[in-house]
Image (tube, helix red, strand yellow):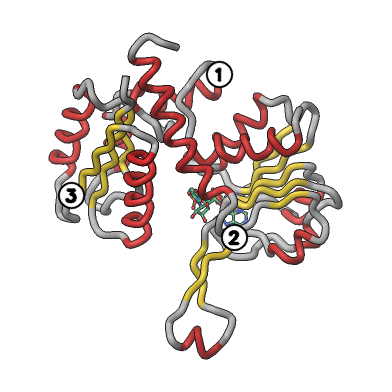
Amino acid sequence: LTPGLAVVLVGEDPASQIYVRNKGEQSKAAGMHSVTHRLPAETSEAELLALVKTLNADPAIHGILVQLPVPKHINDQTIIAALDPDKDVDGLHVINAGRLANGLPALTACTPLGSMILLKETLGDLTGKRAVVVGRSVLVGRPIAQLLLRADCTVTIAHSKTENLKAVCQEADILVAAVGRPGMIRGSWIKEGATVIDVGINRVPFSDPVAAAAGKTKVVGDVKFKEASRRAAFITPVPNGVGPMTIACLLQNTITAARRIAGLE
Ligand code: NDP
């Protein structure tokens, strides 16, 4: 059985192009059947739906990932709803989100899965720990919170309307930042000895004014790393923290999907 992964990219978003290239290369390197569909930005919703339908029916494909965001004229929810839930390796279909929420086996979003592997390998049993997740997106915040709950943590989900976010974060034994705001979480927000998972990926200008004027940029997380690492027991860097785990878990999900479809669970 050769697990097959199809990645679909619509348009030319530069970050998405890098993600899609990495996913294609790494799935091939792992020995998978790997297919990348690059469609022009003007692709219609009907054309994308037709491709999803073809991939749903293709027995050589076990995982389908439509890289988000898609261009504005395409409704991403319509596309996600059209995916065969058994091939939804991004864990975005409501069937998978519902199964996760109900504690049933589900294909689960890759970044949350990767974050949980880091937490469990670092801390072992998470039972009873106070976990705060900042961010409530369907792709990251919500599924991480569900996984932490499943691991018997006491979970708080914070978001843009949360009052006194600093005090909420200060209660966390495990703090997950999935916001998309560079350096928003300061060192003083971290409880001494906490474990910090920084999911944020933010491109910002270089601090050196000459480099910044030349248009040079760098990637930083949602957490002020230097400040936070003085108080945290463990903290993931950005880049090269959670990011590589995301692709590893995409490959893992593709294997899981292939085994389930083949009746090998
Ligand atoms: P979204 O924009 O979908 O969600 C951001 C969340 O942050 C929302 O729930 C929002 O609250 C909350 N938020 C925004 N501003 C504040 C604030 N001032 N205080 C508290 N909460 C706030 O982003 P994603 O979840 O998709 O991604 C989050 C980050 O993770 C991004 O930087 C993204 O690039 C990165 N990412 C990294 C991945 C990886 O592989 N490492 C994979 C996917 C994403 P509200 O709901 O109230 O608007």
Q: Relative to residue 48, is residue 17 depicted above or below?
A: below
> In terms of image quadrants, where is residue 92?
top left
Q: CA distance from mark 2 to mark 1?
A: 31 Å
Mark seen at residue 221: 2
Q: Which residue is mark 1?
A: 102
Dot placed on the residue nearer the N-terminal end, 2 or 3: 3
Q: How busy is the neighbourhood of tag 3: few (under 14 within 10 Å), some, or many (20 plus)?
A: some
Mark 1 residue crowding within 10 angstroms, few (<14) / some (14–19) / many (20+):
few
Front position among marks 2 and 1 = 2
Measured Cα–Cα span from mark 3 to mark 1: 36 Å
Quadrant containing the C terminus in the rendered view: top left
Q: Position of residue 105 (x, y in %)?
A: 51, 17
Residue most extreme to the right: 192
Residue for point 66% across, 52% down? 236
Kindly identify the amino acid type of the residue bearing the numbered disc 1. Answer: Asn
Q: Mark 3 falls on what kind of element?
A: strand
Which residue is labeled 3 in the image?
39
Is the residue marked 2 within 8 Å of ligand 1, measured from its CB? Answer: yes
Residue type, numbered disc 2: Gly
Q: In the image, which is nearer the foreground, mark 3 or mark 1? A: 3
Q: Amino acid at mark 3?
A: Leu
* Residue at figure coordinates x 23%, y 55% from the top left: 11
